[in-house]
Amino acid sequence: GGGSHSSSGYGYNPRSSASASAPSSFSLSSAVFLVETANGRKHLSSHWADEIRRHWRMSPRPDQVPLSDGSLVENFQALECGSAVLRSRDGAQKLEVRLESQIGPRSLNLPNDLESEDQKVDLSSVGKYLSAQEQRRLPDSDKECSICSEDLVAAEKAPVPSWAAARFPSRAQAASVDDDGDVVMEEVHSTSAGSTSVASGPVYQLRCGHVYHTECLKKWFEQRASCPLCLKEFGKVVGTQPRTGSFQWHVDRTVQLPGHMGARGAIMILFEFPPGTDDAGRPYPGRREKGFLPNNCQGIIQLELFKVAFRRRVMFALSTSLTTGRFKPTFNIHIKTKPRGGAAQHGYPDNDYFQRSLDELKNVGISVADLPAGMDCST
């Protein structure tokens, strides 16, 4: 669906020429979930919304989401496309998600906005510690740590692996140990949905949904940065994209993209790389590409993921073009360079483009789980 062909007639003309370089204020907590009823659309309760957000950030994303009251969200992988269905006591209802985001004009400018290339996995950003209450609620199939093959939830002592037991007191309450060897009891926080989260603890759930002893997971991450069960990568993939360049975006409400007639115009994006040399000193020419995203849930999610990819140097790559034989910046994640013409012309409509884009991003280790959760969305 993408390509390197520039569009004519749709210039990149942000209303403000001073595109401020600023971090995104976007978070998934801005998402609003609605269902269609006989009396029109209605908002889901905050409790349901929080449950759905937590599953939205899982990687891989489940296709079905069981909710705590027995309801079920089906076709969840197509949530942004408007194809998800909520099955509850009220029957089957179409589930819609809307996002509010202040979109530009803004820009990211490299090298200033490059992400750190540190590959170390930070537990504060890849999942959450489970409270004692959450541990008890785990299904039987999840109550064993697959790293050490021991129980996660112990009735008479803190749930820790036997190899680390000397560091933990034998107590019914969940506890952790700080760097000095002192016992730190769970610090419990209430959330808006009435659930609890803990700042630390001996049981940890990754964003992919799999649960392990915290100590086992720390040791595992010293050797590899992936989930032991599903192999979801939690260490950052850093690419070969030029270290100097810019990514700009703004909304043009006069541009309507075929296939997205309900969108509020289009998000206009622009990538620019000046001529330079790669890390090995090999020269490459400059490149300038503009593109189009729908200003709706799909486009906003893509824009936010493109920002992550750009800062990690995986949006583009430096490689030899198959068509010209030149060493230059090439697409890693394809963009729509024309507003019309369909997939064959690198434009819209293209019903499969959003999913292909997510798949390309997944191949470089980026998913919705990398987006800010916000205060109302558990990490």
Image (cartoon, rainbow, N blue to C red):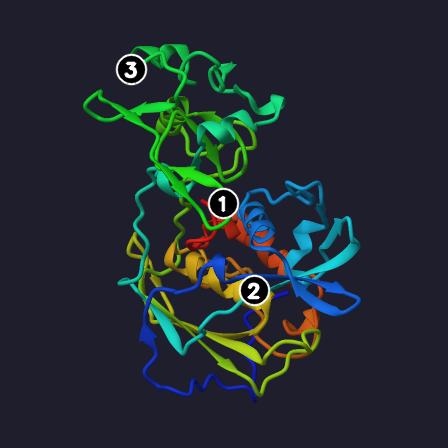
Give me the residue at 71% from left, 45% from top: 71
Cα gap from disc 1 to disc 3, whole angstroms: 32 Å
Query: In this orientation, which residue lies closer to the viewer: 157 or 143?
Result: 157
Query: In this orientation, which residue lies closer to the viewer: 274 or 35?
Result: 35
Q: Where residue 167 is drawn, which disc sits there?
A: 3
Residue type, numbered disc 2: Thr
Say if residue 235 shows up in the picture: yes
Secondary structure of residue under mark 3: helix
* Precedes in sequence: disc 1 or disc 2: 1
Circle nearer the viewer, 1 or 3: 1
Residue type, numbered disc 1: Gly
Circle nearer the viewer, 3 or 2: 3
Q: Is residue 43 above or below residue 222?
A: below
Q: Quadrant of residue 10?
A: bottom right
Q: Is residue 255 above or below residue 324?
A: below
Q: Which residue is mark 2?
A: 323
Q: Which residue is mark 1?
A: 194
Say if residue 367 shows up in the picture: no
Q: Quadrant of residue 130?
A: top left
Circle nearer the viewer, 1 or 2: 1
